[in-house]
Image (cartoon, rainbow, N blue to C red):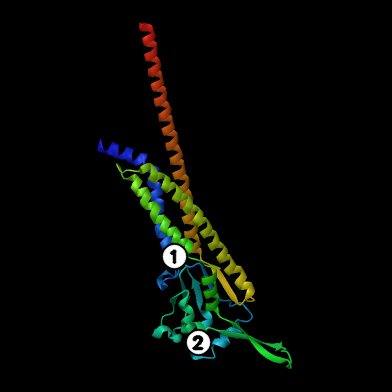
């Protein structure tokens, strides 16, 4: 008897159990996506990575530029990976002695990386372009414009100006909120369940719309890094999108879409069942009242 009751309880709440399972998975996926590149062990979860194009005709010049100082020798092989909150530098030559350590990778806050020594050490001066400036009442003067390239600076600009973690943080907060709301609804004998159901549907819809903007913005930001940086740097810089982060982002979106459809379907079905029960009760009461009236007429 207990097993049958438990089975009926599970089947009756199966849609909401599926929903709460998806939201539980989404909480972990969104958190892992947010803390990608937070530590060297999490460098596999990155949005984009930048590196020097070894097939570029200018790569030998870049390599020789880093050889001018023993400290920077080999920095042409480094890879810069960008996450939502942090930026990581990988394949650092051990001779560089980063942070008084021989580590070959290190992660920085996306805003504070400009204060690190490696930020200034990787600056490359590519060209010197003369520029003539003519001032009033003075003879024309000639200035020199230095064309520089900094791989970490490009990553810093992309991280602070294009990649915005606010949508992902809001998605995590709403995921936690609706997870608690669904859990509340599944617990028997608790009050205000109709109100909680409507609130859960509203949060689910808002969450889907919010992350729709988030995943599209992430897609546009990564495509901009891949396409624009390569062209703007004359093929010197090569950019790649993170496959793992992309898969996680779209998995979150699919789960949110599925949950929203299930919650709306269950809500509409419950409303129709309630309306059917009300109509049935009304029909039964009307039939009983009609029968009573007919019996009274017959008696008279």
Report the disc number at residue 34. 1
Considering depth in this image, is 289 or 78 the residue closer to the camera? Answer: 289
x and y percentages locating residue 11 in the rendered image: 36, 40
- Which residue shows up at 31% across the image and 45% down it? 187
Q: Quadrant of the N terminus?
A: top left
Considering depth in this image, is 177 or 25 the residue closer to the camera? Answer: 177
Which comes before the other along the chain, label 1 or label 2? Answer: 1
Q: Nearer the viewer, mark 1 or mark 2?
A: 1
Report the disc number at residue 72. 2
Q: What element does badge 2 sit on?
A: helix
Q: Is residue 246 above or below residue 89?
A: above
Q: Quadrant of the C terminus?
A: top left
Q: What element does badge 1 sit on?
A: helix
x and y percentages locating residue 214 in the rendered image: 51, 60
x and y percentages locating residue 242 in the rendered image: 51, 66
- Which residue shows up at 44% across the image and 36% down it? 271
């Amino acid at each position: 008897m207990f097993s049958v009751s438990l089975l009926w309880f599970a089947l009756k709440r199966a849609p909401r159990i599926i929903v709460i399972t998806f939201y539980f998975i989404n909480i972990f996926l969104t958190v892992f996506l947010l803390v990608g590149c937070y530590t060297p062990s999490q460098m596999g979860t990155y949005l984009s990575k930048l590196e020097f194009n070894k097939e570029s005709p200018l790569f030998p010049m870049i390599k020789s530029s880093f050889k001018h100082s023993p400290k920077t020798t080999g920095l042409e092989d480094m890879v810069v990976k960008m996450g939502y909150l942090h930026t990581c530098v990988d394949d650092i030559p051990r001779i560089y002695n980063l942070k008084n350590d021989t580590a070959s990778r290190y992660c920085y806050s996306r805003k504070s990386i400009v204060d690190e020594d490696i930020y200034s050490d990787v600056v490359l001066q590519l060209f010197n372009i003369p520029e003539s400036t003519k001032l009033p009442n003075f003879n024309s003067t000639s200035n020199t414009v230095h064309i520089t390239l900094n791989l970490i600076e490009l990553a810093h600009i992309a991280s602070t100006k294009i990649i915005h973690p606010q949508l992902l943080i809001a998605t995590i907060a709403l995921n936690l909120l609706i997870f608690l709301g669904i859990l509340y609804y599944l617990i028997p004998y608790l009050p205000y369940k109709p109100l909680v159901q409507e609130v859960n549907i509203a949060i689910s819809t808002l969450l889907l719309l919010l992350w729709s903007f988030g995943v599209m913005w992430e897609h546009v930001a990564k495509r901009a890094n891949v396409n624009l940086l390569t062209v703007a740097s004359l093929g010197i810089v090569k950019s790649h999108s993170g496959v793992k982060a992309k898969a996680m982002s779209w998995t979150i979106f699919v789960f949110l879409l599925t949950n929203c459809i299930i919650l709306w379907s269950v809500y509409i079905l419950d409303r129709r069942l309630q309306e059917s029960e009300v109509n049935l009760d009304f029909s039964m009461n009307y039939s009983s009242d009609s029968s009573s009236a007919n019996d009274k007429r017959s008696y008279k």
